[in-house]
Amino acid sequence: MTDPTIDLDKILSAAVDRGASDVHLKTGRPPIVRFDGELEPLPGFSALGPHELGTVVNHIGGSAPSRLDVFERTGELDTAYQPLGLPRFRVNAFRQRGESSLAFRVIPHTVPGFKSLRLPPGVETLADEPRGLILVTGATGVGKTTTLAAMVGHINRTRRQHVVTIEDPIEFLHDDELSIVNQREVGIDTESFEEGLRRVLRQDPDVILIGELRDRESAETALQAAESGHLVLSTMHTVDAAETLGRLVEFFPADKQPQVRSILAGVLKGVISQRLLPRTDGGRIAAVEVMVANARIQELIRENKPELVPEAIAEGAFFQMQTLTKALIDLVVSRDVDQETAAAAAPNRHDFMIALDRALKEHAVQIEEPAKDAEPEEPAVQDGHTLRLDNDLRIA
């Protein structure tokens, strides 16, 4: 507790070796890591003192002195940190009871692909859209940024486009492939999130990634950019497509909302909503709802009927839509997630259990039928002679 030094990189290295997704540093506690969704102490490290954590904050924020000034004034610091030989980390430093605490999120070295994330086909279809608005939603820590990174990576590999991102902070790093990718970090590359948004349309973008739609100004910029022919990718902290549509419209005053719904119906291409669940064999996996804005969805947006969106998604398999319930059932059938975990995450537990029971029975029948087809047939016997039916039906 009295030692003023701390080997931060050693802590982070040990956490990465453990397979942790997050690292928490707090005064009076040893480093705590999140592994498979659960918090546990990191073995081999003692409790940390306030001076040690103050040193970490100064070290992390050293690349952007303005951010340290903001931390001193507001008690908040968002940045990224990449020590030599380790992955990149998203870092949030904050004050609690007058002392500094930090939360580190591990960012993988490489940009993941759709297959490695096991995202449904509808996600790739949306990423192929040339223009419009696509939103990735879910609670904090469910992998929204990872899904967005996979979409940008897909665009980067398959299209000759100019991609501009506004992030706070930058997490995944994209090297130019077919596309040019310019990543702007708030506090380093642009003074503020709002300023970056105001300037982005002057930078000749084809694709714009906005880290989060958090207020009317960011939502308005996203709609304007999508309306003017750009592809806009962003996130919202909403649990499903229906809530997303309502929340986005509610950013605007009541007298503007009918106009906003009309614009949204025209530019929205889809909503991807995620939940992260523990796998039965360790690790975590995403259950994904995919809404694609077909004519039915557009009509519901214009008529302000978000409560009917789940039904439209359930009927939209032809358009590669997928409900959360269907995603959860598939994960249970494939034995990636246990039944109780999936039921707890379902929008309606009773309906989920009924649908799951039917799906499991259908799956069991599908397994049994190929097994029966594979069984060798007993040769037919007539008057002591074996009959062999050839293609021309001759009897040998």
Image (cartoon, rainbow, N blue to C red):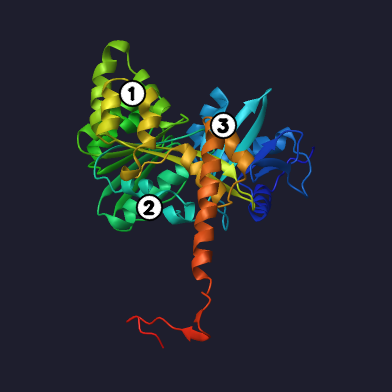
Residue 260 lies, in percent from the top left, at: 27, 21
Judge whether 50 appears above or below 207 on screen.
Answer: above
Please give the label number shown on residue 217. Answer: 1
Cα distance between the residues tagged 1 and 2: 27 Å
Q: Residue at x 36, y 46 (%)?
A: 122
Amino acid found under the numbered disc labelled 3: Arg
Counting other residues with Cα less than 10 Å from the Cα at mark 3, is it few (<14), some (14-19), or many (20 or more)? some
Q: Please, what secondary structure does the residue beneath circle 1 have?
A: helix
On the image, the x and y values in percent for residue 391 come to: 34, 80
Q: CA distance from mark 2 to mark 3?
A: 36 Å
Q: Earlier in the sequence, mark 1 or mark 3?
A: 1
Location of the N terminus by quadrant is top right
What amino acid type is highlighted by mark number 1?
Answer: Glu
Q: Residue at x 53, y 85 (%)?
A: 384
x and y, in percent, of residue 232 in the image: 30, 38
Amino acid type, callout 2: Gly
Question: In this rendering, which labeled residue sits more in front, label 1 or label 2?
Answer: 2
Looking at the image, the residue that sits furthest to the bottom is 396
Q: Can residue 213 be seen in the rendering of this structure?
A: no
Which residue is tagged 3?
349
Position of residue 24 in the picture relative to residue 239 (left or right): right
Q: Nearer the viewer, residue 2 or 322?
A: 322
Callout 1–callout 3 Cβ contact below 8 Å: no
Residue named by callout 2: 153
